[in-house]
Image (cartoon, helix red, strand yellow):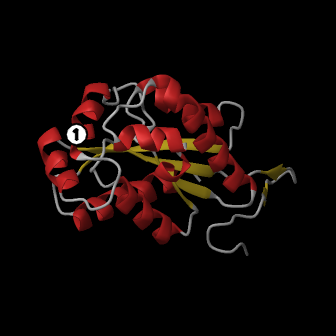
Amino acid sequence: MAESGVSDTTISANGVSQEPTRHVWLVTGPAGCGKSTVAKHISDSLNFPYIEGDEYHTKANVEKMANGIPLTDADRWDWLTLLREESVKRLSEGAEGVVLTCSALKRKYRDVIRVAGYYDPHLVIHFIFLDATEELLLGRVAMRQNHYMGANMVHSQFNDLERPEADETDVIAVDVSGTMDEVKETALARVLEIQKTNQ
């Protein structure tokens, strides 16, 4: 039997090996919405590797954000590609799922991650969009200590934000206006429900 978080290749009735379905769960949303907290909860609950997107930014990107300068599309392309490649790498090492954090504010950013599943029918991409008002997130970010993403960046992120549209069927939205425990449990319940139907 495979260990938790790792799945054996299954054998179909005709003896042909079948690859197990593997999942990338991308927790998205603007600064202050709780991406890291929710992602860590899902990662710990399912024993999936956790990739913190902020840790993969270049030094130049971090310095820009720390100085209140919004990132451009050009700043983000290599970062998004790196996150996609790191997710695929973890799956290739045996994990049946990966949990990733990335703001993915625009549809075209989400599309960069979606590329991972274009040529692999056994890899399924999911997005968990943590939805909140700008006012709520401004209050949360203002209470952060020693984080480069200051409250002044929240407004710029909302300017860039393209909320997922109805045809983005790989996205689930979770309202984060409740307590963090409520948000974590709601997100995990949705993940478990979707994984059950995608095995």
Q: Nearer the viewer, residue 171 or 163?
A: 163
SS at mark 1? helix
Q: Is residue 111 above or below residue 57?
A: above
Q: Nearer the viewer, residue 55 or 145?
A: 145
Q: Nearer the viewer, residue 64 or 191?
A: 64
- The image shows residue 167 at horizontal and vertical percentages of 40, 24
Q: Is residue 60 above or below residue 142?
A: above
- The image shows residue 112 at horizontal and vertical percentages of 56, 30
* Quadrant the N terminus occupies: bottom right
Q: Is residue 164 above or below residue 147?
A: above
Taking 116 as reference, is 136 left or right?
left
Does residue 176 appear anywhere in the picture? yes
Q: Quadrant of residue 124?
A: top right
Taking 117 as reference, is 139 left or right?
left
Query: How many numbered circles does the render carry?
Result: 1
Residue drawn at point x = 61 percent, y = 35 percent = 81
On the image, numbered disc 1 is attached to which residue?
152
Residue drawn at point x = 45 percent, y = 44 percent = 62
- The image shows residue 53 at horizontal and vertical percentages of 50, 49
Q: Amino acid at mark 1?
A: Asn
